[in-house]
Amino acid sequence: MTEIGSPKEDTPSTYGQNEGIIPTGPIDLDSSIPSSPKNDESMTATQSNVDSEKTETKRKLTSFVWNHFKKQKINGVDKAVCNYCQKILGGSSKNGTTHLRDHFNICPLRKHRDIKQSILNPSKKKDGSTSLAAHNFDQECSRHKLAKMIVLHEYPLNMVEHHGFRDFFNSLQPFFKNVSRSTIRRDILKIYENEKTKTKNSISDNCGRVAITTDMWTSNNQKRGYMVVTAHYIDDSWNFHNRIIRFIYVPAPHTAKLLAKVLMECLVEWSLERKLSTLTLDNCTVNIAMMDQMKEKLRNASLLMKGELVHMKCSAHILNLIVQQGLGSIQGAIETIRESVVFWTGTPKRVEKFEEAKKGLSCASNKKLVLDCKTRWNSTYLMLTSAIVYKDVFSRLIHTEKNYKKEPSERDWLLAKVMCEKLKLFYHVTEMFYGTKYPTTNLFFSKICDIWLLLKEYLKSSYDEIRIMASNMMDKFEQYWTSIHGILAIATVMDPRFKMKLIEYYFPKIYVGEYQNEVERIRMLCYDLVKEYKPNDGKENLPDPLSNASGVGGDSDGCVDPLAGYDLFVSSTSKWKTNGLKYPTLQQVARDVLAIPVSTVASESAFSTSGRHVTPCRNRLHPSMLEALVCTQDWLWDEKLDASQNEISHSTFFDDVEDDEAGPSFVDFDS
């Protein structure tokens, strides 16, 4: 059964369409005009002397509204007659079509639909029950959802012009008007602007500070450099958020001066220059020089501790440098195993032969051999762990494959096994720090202390290579220890599970004989930080533990201790969210400190996504469009995924992998 006012079979459907595509032939709407009562307040076609002959149009009518109006000459003047209520409106070209569109939206008779032609659409209520409601097709809504789908799942923009896609969509809804790549591009940019406004308002309405991570990436296809800037904060409901706020094209050369200028412009655009808590960057020479310039530009802003805490070095990058420093001592064993992996993964025939050898020895493991990237220590770790279980397979193949000349020695396998056991903690710690949906600052301190203590144990190893590895790693560790443990220790103190007790537990093990000075230094950092948050409004009678001197003595000059009552606070609370009214200042400090990321992973993860955006077939994508795609995708997924849910890898939407083909995966832990 066809809709009222539907086109003839030999005429392409244009119901609910936008302007922009000209119909291929005239549309006869006479037979589809419903009968209706006369309107006493307006002139109708039956109340006027109407020229029954239709106007000979000089140009084609392209607007969709002409599917619902007839253009006629009435008393020698062009008029548009509504197909439903017969109301007569101006139909001249100089009148435009806006007034026709407005009438179409409010026409009372158009809304009286035949219930037999409605589609029942099941919809879920808030209580989980399902109800049936009449569904009416909306072209604009469908286009909006199509644009969102392309952004969310990284589909190519020109998919809307593919014949298969159009046939599929037409089978679902014949009234849907196909759109072009240019049209869907404009729709995506509209969504980007709307989501950008919503994200700006969300960050602006948040009363806490915002931590920033940033990193650089160069597109292989475009040969262009991009800076990604990500904002991290905890909202008033104590939900953790991270938002990509810019994906900026930065022309070469990428000097410290230029990077500082671009980053500062971003902070000003988003009104973050006075709400900034920290900047987390990779530890490289350019970034260090850039931070010096950023501190100069931000000198008039309200930085914490006069900028002492603003520069956070990426802890995951530091761990990578530490491990790389240690791997050099057993490089010979690693290289021998790598050569064997290269040989047996080099051709499909060799892979099949290796699999046959596995079956012959009844190996229980289903792991596949993976080749590492030499600059990524975690990939080397995964390569060794996958190869160690097939030690006997390699030994057997040396006798059956004449081109396989050299297998790893027993010493090589032993060192690889011991090294993997020693680096297991590094791997799992780094994996944990690469979470982006939960705070990591409070978790890092205890783990970094564990690593320090393990390295001290490794110095006592019976293997010379392991002792050398531990010594090299300890030297690199000490270079960064002081610069990373200050703010992280404060975050640990702000965690009600740990408090100062965790500091007092670890520091005697790390600082033999002089730990009390270090414990006191961390305590004073907490004092100084809380002083900056303490409101100076004279309201000392507020129920804030900072104004309560009980439990902690005063200073030597008679001033009240800034953390008076803190011990009572940390011993009586388990959730900051529920104690905000009682301890507002400490709650605000905790919100800002716990939101600080320990790594740049949230920014680096955008590059794996953008790598698919800038595919060889889309290497002419304009930087502004690339930014719209990357940022909008991030914002839309944040709306769909709850912060407590497991993270979803965007690659799962783009790549098809069978379960039995899935091998070990690794995260890029270096910059």
Image (cartoon, helix red, strand yellow):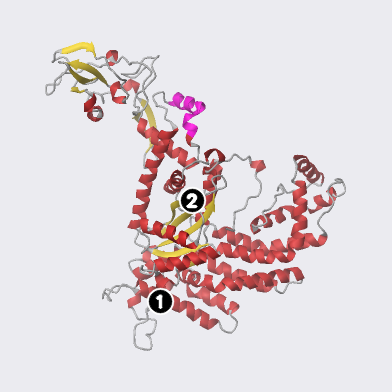
What is the magenta range? 158-172
- Spatial CA span between label 1 and label 2: 36 Å
The quadrant of the image that shows the N terminus is: top left
Q: Quadrant of the C terminus?
A: bottom right
- The structure residue drawn at horizontal position 41% and vertical position 36%, both measured from the top left corner, is 145
- Residue placed farthest to the top in the image? 53
For residue 303, above or below residue 548: above
Residue type at tag 1: Asp
Query: CB atoms at circles 1 and 2 under 8 Å apart?
Result: no
Q: Is residue 43 placed above or below 380 in the rendered structure?
A: above
Q: Which numbered circle lies on residue 528? A: 1
Position of 465 compared to 314: left or right? right
Question: In the figure, residue 113 lies in which quadrant?
Answer: top left
Residue 69, located in which quarter of the rendered image?
A: top left
The front one of 20 and 238 is: 20
Q: Earlier in the sequence, mark 1 or mark 2?
A: 1
Q: Which mark is residue 360?
A: none
> Vertically, is 88 above or below 518?
above
**In the rendered view, does 451 fall on the left or right side of 294?**
right
Q: Position of residue 360 (x, y in %)?
A: 82, 44
At x 52%, y 83%, the residue is 516
Q: Give residue 28's position: percent from left, percent from top.
A: 31, 14
Task: Classify residue 45 by image quadrant.
Answer: top left
Q: Secondary structure at mark 1?
A: helix
Which element is circle 2 on?
loop
Q: Amino acid at mark 2?
A: Gln
Residue 486 on image: x %, y %:
50, 73
- Residue drawn where x is 54% and y is 62% of the image: 282
Q: Which residue is mark 2?
A: 645
Give x and y (percent) for residue 434: 54, 57
Residue 436, can we see it?
Answer: yes
- Could you classify mark 2 by the number of other residues whose Cα lies within 10 Å: few (under 14), some (14-19), or many (20 or more)? few
